[in-house]
Image (cartoon, helix red, strand yellow):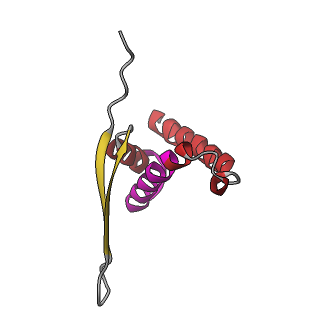
Amino acid sequence: MFPTKPKQQQYRVIIEEIDAEEPKSLEFSYQDREDVFNIIDKLKKGSGLEPESATQVAVALRLLGPVMMKDRKHPLFADFAPHFKSFMHNLKSTVKESMKA
């Protein structure tokens, strides 16, 4: 039997400018192997951030992380990647520890 590829979640991101004379909007779709809503819930419960901030961080990380992994040899990410990895380890351990309590 062949190993199965993990199912990809499909998402749509919509950003709308609210207080502008001529508001702009941006919309794009992407796939993610992770359940972004589950990640948002975990960060809201265990990160110590305000709920809106936790949501923003979760979405930002799920947009940036896979791009960095896919393009890890790109010079743009060379200096940042080790710090991102350290940040992610710290975030995951913080959330995990807070869920134990």
**Image quarter for residue 85?**
top right
Give the main secondary structure, helix, strand or loop, of the magenta stretch: helix
Tell me the residue at 56%/47% (across/down): 71
Tell me the residue at 71%/54% (across/down): 79
Tell me the residue at 55%/48% (across/down): 68
Most distant residue in the top direction:
1
Query: Which sits in the foreground, 2 or 89?
Result: 2
Tell me the residue at 47%/33% (across/down): 100
Answer left or right for 25 relative to 90.
left
In the figure, 4 relative to 53: above or below?
Answer: above
Query: Which sits in the foreground, 85 or 6?
Result: 6
* Residue 32 at x, y percent in the picture: 38, 42
* Residue 7 at x, y percent in the picture: 32, 31
Answer left or right for 63 relative to 27.
right
In the figure, 101 relative to 53: above or below?
Answer: above
**Residue 53 on the magenta span:** yes
In the figure, 101 relative to 61: above or below?
Answer: above
Query: Which sits in the foreground, 90 or 77?
Result: 77
Most distant residue in the bottom direction:
21
Query: Which sits in the foreground, 74 or 99?
Result: 74
Where are the magenta residues, as a range?
46-66
- Residue 15 visible here: no
**Residue 29 on the magenta span:** no
- Residue 2 visible here: yes
